[in-house]
Image: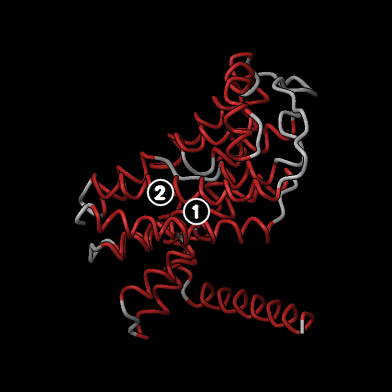
Amino acid sequence: MRDFTKRFSSALLTAAVLFAIVLFLVFPARYARSVRDGIDLWAVSVLPATLPMFFLTAIFTRRKLFARVAKALSPLSAALFGVSGGGACAALLSALSGYPVGARTVYDLSRTGVLCEDERFRVACLSTTSGPAFLVGAVGGGMFRSAAAGWVLFLSHLMGICLVCFLLRLFAKGRRRTSFVPKGETLSLSELLSGSVLSVLCVGGAIAIFSVFGQMIADLCAPLGLPAIPEAMLRGLLEMTAGCSLLSSAPSALSLALCCFLVTFGGLCVLIQQLAFLTQAGISVPKFLAVKFAQGVVSALLCYVLSLLCGF
């Protein structure tokens, strides 16, 4: 049965890839425009915020101040999530900055020896969050026309992630002492900058590619006449921003909760951006996806309850 499932999944993926190639060859101008739209989105909205944060966090994690903050946070983070203070710093940077800064920070801290092997998975699950600028500003204020809805979304998002990670600590092995000071090679500012540029180019590539896939999904959904919510979820599982935009066309507690699920799970585009860094830190992809799905469900339930309490 397991071999059959594996062969079926492989055949399904191959068929989807071949179908996408055919669509691109039949309508090259249409989908080339989608690539340009993705690049424009990356260049205008993502690059200006992400590149500086990649560079600055790479510097910060190698400074003595980072070691002091990590040491101060260590008792609380160990008690709540079974992770070191370095892991807590990664989670804090992720919550402030959003995708995919947290994933890149986990990779950096793993490479420099700040995170031990046992805690990396829990830190990765805790540090892959969206930020207030996107959730409150773009989704809440921009899409749902309500900053209050954005704060409900942001708080539910963080609470769902933290609750699942709190439960994950039950599976933690014996905690090992970790170093707060990075080990290994010392990189120059030019090396840190070049690494940050390559990282943000990887993010841009993912956005451009999934802009094409999103347009293909929209073209396939149009003749099927799918209801608004199923279409929004289908597109959101591929690229969360498009799904949130569609859900916001009919604001309600349910649509906000479904939006919270998409943002927390991330959608395939965001997951690819994160896994580009996390796999290099030795994170198991199936386990990570399972935890992100659980976090998405918990966050959505919390968001639905809070939305009803706030009269949304």
Q: How is the image coloured?
A: secondary structure
Relative to 284, is 243 on the left or the right? left
Q: Residue 64: x and y, percent?
A: 63, 13
- Neighbour class for label 2 at 10 Å: few (<14), some, many (≥20)? some
Quadrant the C terminus occupies: bottom left
Q: Nearer the viewer, residue 256 or 166?
A: 166
Image point (36%, 39%), residue name: 133
On residue 207, the disc is 1
* Label 2 to label 1: alpha-carbon separation: 8 Å
Q: Which residue is mark 2?
A: 41
Query: What is the quadrant of residue 34 in the picture?
Result: bottom left
- Element carrying mark 2: helix
Q: Residue 59: x and y, percent?
A: 60, 21
What residue type is disc 2 on? Leu
Q: Residue 283: x and y, percent?
A: 71, 49
Q: Nearer the viewer, residue 44 or 166?
A: 166
Image point (61%, 35%), residue name: 79
Q: Nearer the viewer, residue 232 or 88?
A: 88
Image point (51%, 56%), residue name: 295
Q: Residue 175: x and y, percent?
A: 75, 36
- Is 193 placed above or below 135 here? above
Q: Residue furthest top?
A: 64
| Residue contact between numbered discs 2 and 1, judged by CB atoms under 8 Å | yes
Relative to 51, is 81 on the left or the right? right
Precedes in sequence: disc 2 or disc 1: 2
